[in-house]
Amino acid sequence: MTEQREFQAEVSRLLDIVANALYTEREIFLRELISNASDACDRLRYEAIAKPELAEGNSDFRITVAFDADARTVTVSDNGIGMTKDELIQNLGTIAHSGTRELVKQLNGDDKKNSNLIGQFGVGFYSAFMIADKVDVLSRRAGEKVAHVWSSDGRGSYTVDEALKDEPGTQITLHVKDDASEFLLEERLKHVIKKYSDHISFPIEMSGVVVNAASALWMRPKNEVTEEQYKEFYRSVSGGLQMDEPWMTLHWRAEGAIEYNNLLFIPSMKPFDLYDPRRQHGVKLYVRRVFITDGVEGLIPPFLRFMKGVVDSEDLPLNISREMLQANPVIAKMSGAITRKILSELEDKAKNDLKEFENFWALFGPVIKEGLYDAHAYREQLCRVARFYSSQGEGLVSLDEYVERMKDGQEHIYYLSAPTVEAARNSPQLEAFRAKGVEVLFMTDTIDEFWLPMQDSYKQKKLKSITRGSAELSKVKSGKDETTEEEKKTPEEKQAAQDATEKLIAALKDILKDEVKDVAVSERLVDSPVCLVAPENDVDIHMQRMLKKSQGYEGKHQHVLEINDKHPVIARLKTLAANDPKSTLLRETALLLLDQARIVEGEPLANPSEFVRRMNMAIEKGLVAS
Ligand code: ADP
Ligand code: MG
């Protein structure tokens, strides 16, 4: 009995675009169908380990591509897992794959852009409609008696019918469009198979001849694998979702107590779901060439979840259930060694090609730093991989390099927490550090606020925030003549200066008592009159804001307003405070300065219109005086 069904709306839209746009690369339909056939063989091979009867005595998995120029058909067949009726409806009538859904979202009215996207991503099974105006999928699920045939012209609906099929698996027949006759030529098809599917580990046959290399790419010696083959393989292990090229390819064999082969990639683009809490890593586990499963927990640590590729173990039992994998000590051992290998490659890359490394770090630095927070076992190595922007130079610096160029008398590793590198560079808290030539690391990722409190020190140097507590710069030698104006003063002059400062501080504390926790003389300012810092034992100002944003944290934090004793504005205020601590001008200026400090810090102003009013008043005074 034939049953007619509508495609899910998203599928119809996708099919419209696929069928109507102009494609330069429509040959990729074959890559997609072969990739599905290969997955289907992988799945049956795995399931047949526990239930050999499923394979019906057939252990020679293979994919066959055939064509009939007279009937104008191309068929792609496999003896893999096959699909039940429900699976045909579910898999070919809806878009279940989150990656494909993401791609569909990006498709729009621009034909050229669309075809590019489709060509590079692939739209899986639906790409068959690029060259076919009708597609029949005859499939029998392993273990089932009946087969079904799914059929569609790709225009809104499809039919499903019962059918007969001798062996389990799937046979896809493409009725080739008039303008796609090139795919009815043997050489053309062979060429496309070689180009995209050479790395497929099952034999792909045409007229009884195997066209591809049909051996697992990761088992081949490195020097026999071309760049192109690595790229195609990368594409295929990414499930066709990455349209980039690998940023780094790691291909090695581990020998010794346990043996395994690895072919791993670091992408050069950020996966769209990198921060999705459900995201798994993209490394597939094989056991002696048999695909076992994706994303085994415990194989690749979360801070490397952008990795793609294959790990193929020689030691794990083939019949291990997916549930038991995680607890297997071989997985833990491989994981440790693989993680250390990846980190050491990254370390080398950072040392040898910092420019290239910068591209990587921009995408995945924040993810790597998660390991500093929760992967104690790798912390030391992670500290050697981690790079930071700093107040010195434009490029990235490592903790080791920082420690090496610390100034005489400098005891701590200083850092500044800020929303962006740009904001950090312009921070007033940096001024004195800059003047003394003391380097400050910039911490601009959300994750920094989490690992920093746990990483008390590095190489016996304390990690210290420069926006918290006192600056402690007095011990650092700047190399310049340090006898300041201050030191030339007589004891009486010094006392008078100190009294004036104290008076001002008392007046400011009174004016700002509801706004700040304290007012103090700053050691960190040179050019700016004031800045805000957090008290020594409190949380950094920038972090307070982030906690507020990410966790709705509303702790009561009050900042310390630091004043630059040597700044002309502060000198003027001292005179005002000495004459009349209650003066309106002193009050207005104090509030104006506080708001300025807040702006620089990226803090919201409680009352922007009051700020504007005070600002205008000050401008007016300035203009009148000029
Ligand atoms: P993807 O391969 O990314 O999941 P596709 O559009 O290529 O997306 O395929 C959709 C689904 O259809 C597959 O996930 C699979 O479940 C099923 N499928 C496609 N081709 C086959 C096949 N030859 N054998 C068994 N199942 C298949
Ligand atoms: Mg597919």
Image (spheres, rainbow, N blue to C red):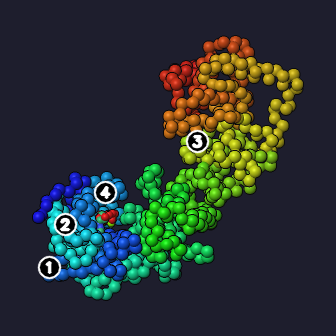
Q: Tag 4: Cα neighbours inside 10 Å, few (<14), some, or many (≥20)?
A: few
The amino acid on which the numbered mark 4 sits, given as a three-letter code, is: Ala
Q: Which of labels 2 and 1 is toward the front?
A: 2
State the image quarter where residue 173 is shown.
Answer: bottom left
Ligand 1 is within 8 Å of the C-beta of the residue at disc 4: yes
The amino acid on which the numbered mark 2 sits, given as a three-letter code, is: Trp
Please state which of residues 252 and 179 is positioned toward the viewer in this rendering: 252
Residue matched to label 4: 96
Please state which of residues 52 and 473 is positioned toward the viewer in this rendering: 52
Residue at mark 3 to residue at mark 4: CA–CA distance? 40 Å
Residue at mark 2 to residue at mark 3: CA–CA distance? 57 Å
Q: Tag 3: Cα neighbours inside 10 Å, few (<14), some, or many (≥20)?
A: many
x, y percent for residue 625? 61, 20
The mark found on residue 71 in the picture is: 1
State the image quarter where residue 505 is shown.
Answer: top right
Residue matched to label 2: 150
Ligand 1 is found in the corner quadrant, namely: bottom left
